[in-house]
Amino acid sequence: MNLKKQFASVLTAAAVLGATPALPMSVVNAAGDTADQLATITSATTPSSLKVKVTKTKTAKTVYVFQKVTIQLSGAKSFKSSNKKVATVTSKGVVKFKKAGKVNITFKKGSKKYTVTFTVKAATLTLSKSKVTVKVKKSYTVKAKTVKPANTVKWSSKNAKVATVKNGTITGKKKGTTYVYAKANGLTKSVKVTVK
């Protein structure tokens, strides 16, 4: 199947599921990966869940706190975390990260011992304004200046009767005070909105 036909089939599948069409699934080397460690990327943005296939006894990977990793190695058992304050791991190899730092996840397969070293980074989200004043029927756009890694920012309003927000653009509806929120990568930032 050529690339054009493969992309078309992915779009068709997405339409059937009623989802927003995503990029074709591909397997790529992620940042910090060694040749034996692959991450399955399922969209254009940094996914919250990664699948790491391990074939060598020592590998390394850089991840962010909001991500979850499933270590894939048939027959692996006895998973352990070297620092449970940074990350925990289940008996099935699912790793959840709690804070920035470095952690070793060790496990066994037969007589071999494996180690995956994760460098965990904190995600960031910075807004251009923390307070905004707008008039009724007027708008002001707040920008998400830094989102790392670059995932979609979801905006919401605490009181849509006072002010609405779409892609960071705040529109005054009636006089009053409310908050709008930006969420990305497990982080939430607020903007105080005063409508006059």
Image (cartoon, rainbow, N blue to C red):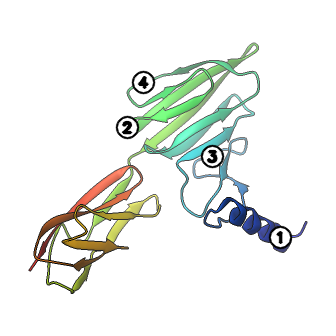
Secondary structure state at the residue bearing disc 3: loop
Which is more N-terminal, label 3 or label 4? Answer: 3
Q: Residues within 10 Å of mark 3 (few under 14, many from 20)?
A: some
Q: Secondary structure at mark 4?
A: loop
**Cα gap from disc 3 to disc 1, whole angstroms:** 26 Å
User: What type is the residue that disc 4 sits on?
Assistant: Lys
Mark 2 vs mark 3: in front: 2
Instruction: Check the image and report above or below for 9 versus 80.
Output: below
Task: Assess disc 4: are there few (<14), some (14-19) or many (≥20) residues with their C-alpha within 10 Å of its C-alpha.
Answer: some
* Separation of marks 4 and 3 at Cα, in angstroms: 22 Å
Q: Are marks 2 and 1 in contact (CB under 8 Å)?
A: no
Q: Earlier in the sequence, mark 2 or mark 4?
A: 4
Q: Nearer the viewer, residue 158 or 121?
A: 158
Residue of label 1: 3
Residue type marked 2? Lys
Question: Where the C terminus falls, by quadrant?
Answer: bottom left
Circle 3 residue: 33
Residue topped by disc 4: 84
- Mark 2 surroundings within 10 Å by alpha-carbon count, few (fewer than 14), some (14 through 19), many (20 or more): some
Q: Amino acid at mark 3?
A: Asp
* Left/right of residue 37 with respect to residue 150 in the rendered view: right
Specify few, some or many for label 1: CA neighbours under 10 Å numbering under 14, 14-19, or 20 or more.
few
| Residue at figure coordinates x 30%, y 72% from the top left | 165
Name which of mark 2 and mark 1 comes first in the sequence.
1
Residue 143, visible in the rendered structure: no
Mark in front: 4 vs 3: 4
Measure the alpha-carbon separation of dots 2 and 1: 39 Å
Query: Measuring 66% from the left and 40% from the top, which residue is drawn there?
Result: 52
